[in-house]
Amino acid sequence: MVELTIIIYILLIAAIMAAIFAIEYKNLMISIISLVVMNLAIWGVFLFLGATLLAWIQVIVYGGGLTSLFVTVVSLTEKQKDETFSLKRSIIALAIIAAIMALSIWAVVSSEGLYTPSGISSITESLELLWSERIMDLILQAVVFFTASIAIGTLFISHKKKKLKEEVEV
Amino acid sequence: MIDQLHLLILGIILFCVGLYALLGKRNVIKILMGIEIMTIAVNVIFIALGANIANETFTQFAQIFPLISIALGAAVLSVGLAIVINNYRHAKSVDSDEIATLKR
């Protein structure tokens, strides 16, 4: 048990270090690799906490899909190195971040028990709960997305027709 | 066993690292990386609050919001990266100061 706790603390530190490395390293490809390492560390933490479904979805979406997108963008933009460093801007940002971090950590430390009621975590139960408790939200989202996609499609088609008409007239 | 407080502090530190990228960096790709880190930090906080470490159990309800958050975060990043590529074709730069006006 003690070994497992030590591994989790190592993962926590690795996640923070990888995040800082991803932001600060000049070579963008190494930044992306650091981002993957951070995702893997967070995946381990989620698995340890029992959020199995979320751990796998997170590592698939962020660790896999978005990483490939980042690699594609860095390759296409041909800017492999970040040469846009501004000392003044960094110092101001660091001061703001230090204040926000100190305030947040103080707020969390001074607040008491944040525990929620217990339950059992599994993929089926999570999806069943989503289906039973949030069905109205899902229907609303579906209606909104459907309407929006039809509206955008109609706009595109009408714009294209208008353009075609103008070209014929010319 | 790991303390819930430490997980919350991990979330706060990750969020602040992402915010630093947002405020202090000019490279748009780095800014998007910061947004990704911030999204993950919020998910970590949600999961930390859902985990009842004293009983070694987990509230399944805590997984639902991060699930939606991951989907939205992925969509936001995809659109952001598409904008970066389109802007690079015109401005030949990924510096946020140079492409700030979005004018041609």
Image (cartoon, rainbow, N blue to C red):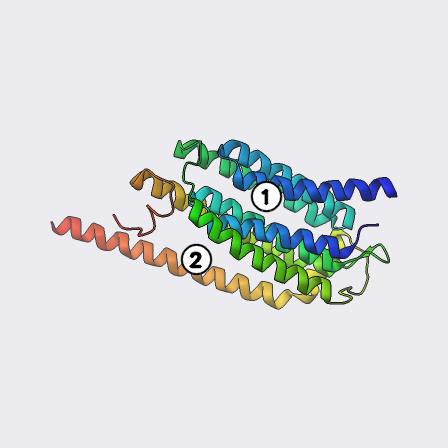
The residue carrying mark 2 is A149
Pinpoint residue A163: horizontal percent, then vertical percent. 22, 52
- Asked if residue A19 lies left or right of residue B83, the reply is right
* Rendered image: mark on residue A30: none
Horizontally, residue B15 falls left or right of residue A124, namely left
Count of numbered tags: 2
Q: The residue under label 2 is which amino acid type? A: Ser
Examine the rendered structure and indicate whether residue A24 appears above or below residue B75. Answer: above
Which residue bears the numbered disc 1? Answer: A62
Q: Is residue A11 left or right of residue B96?
A: right
Where, by quadrant of the figure, is residue A105 drawn? bottom right
Sequence-wise, which precedes: disc 1 or disc 2?
A: 1
Q: Which amino acid does label 1 sit on?
A: Tyr
Q: Is mark 1 on a helix, strand or loop?
A: helix
- Which residue appears at 35% of the width and 39% of the height? B93
Question: Residue at point 63% right, 40% down?
Answer: A17
Question: In the rendered view, would you say B100 is above or below A118?
Answer: above
Q: Quadrant of the N terminus of chain A?
A: top right
Q: Nearer the viewer, residue B83 or A29?
A: A29
Local packing at callout 1 (Cα closer than 10 Å; few below 14, some 14-19, many 20+) is many
